[in-house]
């Protein structure tokens, strides 16, 4: 079972993962050398490579313990779509990343998580939680807060395709007995394409 814990910046993803008592795949830590978008093909390859490494860790952890919790969705394809949705990046960035993701799906190097725990607090609560955590700088907080609405739309599209795959909110504890069983369609290109087709026009 691979469980992604998702939400905007300051939603409480890392806090929930740490409090779950389960081993988890940490979120990506910026290095300062991330591509800035001059080469969209190279940028897409970079992020798919990063996310494939996190997916591999999730597979290893789930094979060892039975469940892998991931601090943010290893697929992460929603990010470039959300940026395009709010006008913060060109739609072509998403198109290049989608092409790279489809290739990774075909190689089974990246896939859809079995379950997504999604929490999208309102703006005042996000700000309060940001201010309540002085250990995190969150330099792009304002931008990430703007992504809340398209993020909800992304996972609503996934839930419409596969009811029960997206859980609203972070539960006090992860009860595997109440979750749908591990999916057999983690690498299903038709499901990925249907997800993209079901999104609002950007």
Image (cartoon, rainbow, N blue to C red):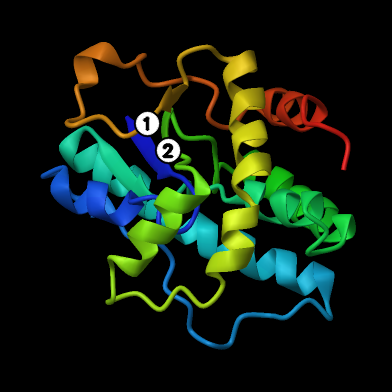
Report x, y in % for residue 45: 69, 66
Q: Is residue 94 left or right of residue 154?
A: right
Residue 54, x across and y down, in percent: 43, 57
* Marked residue nearer the N-terminal end (1 or 2): 2
Task: Tell me if residue 153 comes above or below residue 146 in the rendering.
Answer: above
Q: Which residue is mark 2?
A: 119
Residue 70, x across and y down, in percent: 35, 47
The residue under label 1 is 169
Side of 200 where 119 appears, left or right: left
To which quarter of the image does residue 63 belong?
A: top left
Q: Nearer the viewer, residue 152 or 32?
A: 152
Q: Quadrant of the C terminus?
A: top right
Q: Answer left or right for 55 relative to 98.
A: left
What secondary structure is marked by label 1?
loop
Which residue lies at the image location 65% right of the left edge and 41% below the top edge?
A: 149
Are circles 1 and 2 on residues that touch, CB within 8 Å?
Answer: yes
Left or right placement of residue 24 versus residue 125 in this view: left
Residue appearing at x 26%, y 12% in the figure? 178
Q: Is residue 55 visible?
A: no
Please say whether residue 98 is visible from this viewpoint: yes
Secondary structure of the residue carrying tag 2 is: loop
How many angstroms separate mark 1 from mark 2 (CA)? 4 Å
Where 39 sits versus 56, above or below?
below
**Split into 4 quadrants, where in the image is the N terminus?**
top left
Residue pictured at 42% horizontal, 73% vertical: 29
């Amino acid at each position: 079972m691979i469980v992604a814990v998702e939400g905007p910046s300051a939603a409480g993803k890392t806090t929930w993962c740490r409090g779950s008592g389960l081993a988890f795949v940490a979120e990506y830590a910026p290095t300062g050398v991330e591509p800035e978008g001059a080469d969209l093909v190279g940028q897409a390859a970079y992020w798919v490579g990063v996310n494939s490494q996190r997916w591999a860790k999730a597979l290893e952890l789930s094979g060892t313990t039975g469940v892998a919790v991931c601090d943010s969705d290893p697929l992460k394809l929603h990010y470039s779509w959300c940026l395009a949705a709010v006008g913060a990046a060109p739609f072509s960035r998403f198109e290049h990343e989608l092409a790279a993701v489809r290739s990774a799906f075909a190689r089974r190097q990246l896939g859809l998580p079995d379950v997504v725990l999604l929490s999208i607090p309102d703006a005042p609560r996000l700000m309060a939680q940001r201010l309540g955590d002085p250990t995190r700088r969150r330099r792009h907080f304002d931008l990430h807060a703007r992504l809340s609405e398209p993020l909800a739309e992304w996972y609503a599209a996934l839930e419409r395709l596969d009811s029960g795959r997206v859980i609203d909110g972070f539960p006090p504890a992860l009860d595997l007995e109440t979750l749908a069983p591990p999916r057999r369609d983690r690498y299903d290109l038709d499901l990925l394409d249907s997800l993209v087709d079901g999104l609002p026009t950007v």
